[in-house]
Amino acid sequence: MTRVEDFVSHFDALAGKIPANIYYQDRPDGNRISALVYPDVPENGMLVGVTYGLSLLDNPAWTRGRPELLIGVKSTDHRWARAAGLLAANITGCPFSYGTVLNFGQPITDESTMDHFVVFAPTLLDEADFLNVLNAPEGAPAQDVIHVAGIYPIHASEAAAISDGKLEEFWKSGADLYDVTRPAVL
């Protein structure tokens, strides 16, 4: 199997099904980012989206592996998954490291006022399912190692607080990280 087939098979197995849709976003450099959409995962009324293609790009910060993005929300709107693909395709030079705040520039969907994301470990997955998802051997070059980073929709006020060093306060706030209609907690 190819790298992309291995990656998609990994997430198909986790979801227990194939993606309902795959959205594509072309980058100016000719690379393509895919956003795979898994509705009703991990439960009815939720949606999981995962990108593929970000890990094919180069970034000097990616010395131990390269990222792909995962979003999980209580929504049936595929635009949440598409947003992950748009971020991966359009934010160049971003390390997508934990605590990074990403400005989407507008509300992500009509159902929510959230317009930012924060990157952190994907809480919907076990560590073995998001670190080195292609099982590259120990010592493999970074381009052969894919780590999946979670992106969580947040309000502008939360983005400002996190950027001011309050990530831990946000994380411990008890906010439902999957509820796209929740009020701001910071």
Image (cartoon, rainbow, N blue to C red):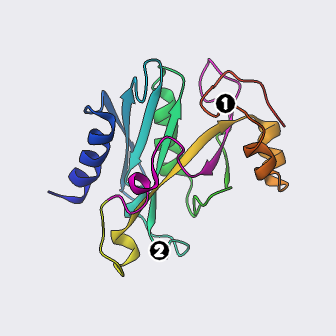
Q: Which disc, if any, is residue 133?
A: none
The 10 Å Cα crowd at callout 1, few under 14, some 14 to 19, many 20 or more, is some
Q: Position of residue 171 (x, y in %)?
A: 73, 45
Q: Is residue 7 above or below residue 184?
A: below
Q: Is residue 103 above or below residue 72?
A: below
Is label 1 in a helix, a strand or a loop?
A: loop
Residue at the spot of label 2: 64
Q: Position of residue 148 (x, y in %)?
A: 45, 54
Residues rendered magenta in the picture: 106-133
Q: Residue furthest left?
A: 1
Q: Decide if residue 94 is on the left or right side of residue 132.
A: right
Mark 1 residue type: Asp
Residue at the spot of label 1: 176
In the image, is residue 120 part of the stretch drawn in magenta? Answer: yes
Q: Position of residue 46 (x, y in %)?
A: 48, 24
Q: Is residue 66 above or below residue 72?
A: below
- In terms of secondary structure, what is the magenta stretch mainly? loop
Residue 182 falls in image quadrant: top right
Q: Position of residue 103 (x, y in %)?
A: 68, 44
Q: Decide if residue 186 is on the left or right side of residue 172.
A: right
Mark 1 vs 2: CB contact within 8 A? no
